Image (cartoon, rainbow, N blue to C red):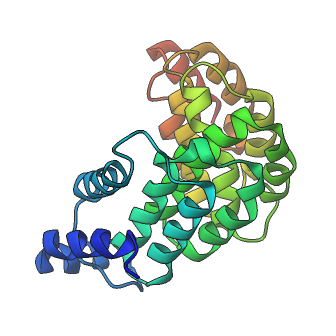
Amino acid sequence: MPTLAEPVDRELRDRGRDARAQKEKAYLKSALDHYGVSVPDTRAIVRAALRGVEPSGTKLSHVEVVDLARELWAVPVHERRAAAAMVLIQTQDRLGAGDASFIEGLLREAKTWALVDPLAGDLVGPLSERDTAFDPVLERWASDGDFWIRRSALLAHLVPLRQGRGDFDRFSRFADAMLEEKEFFIRKAIGWVLRDISRKRPDLVFDWILPRAHRTSGVTIREAVKRLSPEQRESVLNAR
């Protein structure tokens, strides 16, 4: 019996471009196959597929959502896995902390920021904000041996903190423990979250980063100070 994954895959193949596929595979240093479909096109394909099966307002069930994501993800093609992430993000109202192990499995298999970041930021972030049962999961992720999982623990705070909400104390604790790590993707994630917090709360970021500037990598500092005032930026750079 045909499943929704099949028309999604067919649309992805139809919109794929060989030149783009080769370029993106090289850029991401990807071990996956690539169709060569842009992120906006992939998102549009997923949205259209979901609208097509929910025309009367009847939603896919939790089981159907997870099964669709599993089926898309199972084939090692980058755009199929990106589509699986988008399915989960677009149907997150049917997901919760009970899906943490499933999501963690995807994060462990992803091995690239292009899949990890939307799963962590756009899926785990909102889910963990509304469901405190995610708290112990994030605590465990923050000290995991896989840096992609540690990055996910940081980026789960991105959207709420960017919007002026979120648990800054927990992010601060996670970031402080990882501040001296050598891994680029950890350093970048800390700076990224701090940069986005400073959109609404620059003083909070300044007060946090200034006494830690001497311990902070250049990658993190460069991101963190982008939206600070010139005076704040100069103080942080001088402290480093």
Does residue 125 show up? yes
Query: How many numbered marks, from 0 up?
Result: 0
Horizontal arrangement in the rendering, residue 123 relative to residue 112 (left or right): right
Tell me: residue 233, above or below residue 142: above
Horizontal arrangement in the rendering, residue 84 relative to residue 166 (left or right): left
Seen at 44% across and 74% down, the residue is: 72
Q: Identify the image quadrant of residue 149.
A: bottom right
The residue closer to the viewer here, 190 or 206, is: 190
Q: Identify the image quadrant of residue 157.
A: top right
x and y, in percent, of residue 156 in the image: 64, 44
The residue closer to the viewer here, 234 or 167, is: 167
Quadrant into which the C terminus falls: top right
The residue closer to the viewer here, 236 or 155, is: 155
Tell me: residue 239, above or below residue 70: above
Quadrant into which the N terminus falls: bottom left
Seen at 49% across and 68% down, the residue is: 68
Tell me: residue 65, above or below residue 105: above
Seen at 68% across and 66% down, the residue is: 102
x and y, in percent, of residue 38 in the image: 23, 60
The residue closer to the viewer here, 74 or 137, is: 74
x and y, in percent, of residue 70 in the image: 54, 73
x and y, in percent, of residue 33 in the image: 33, 85
Seen at 31% across and 57% down, the residue is: 49
Does residue 36 show up? no
Q: Identify the image quadrant of residue 204.
A: top right
Horizontal arrangement in the rendering, residue 232 relative to residue 95 (left or right): left
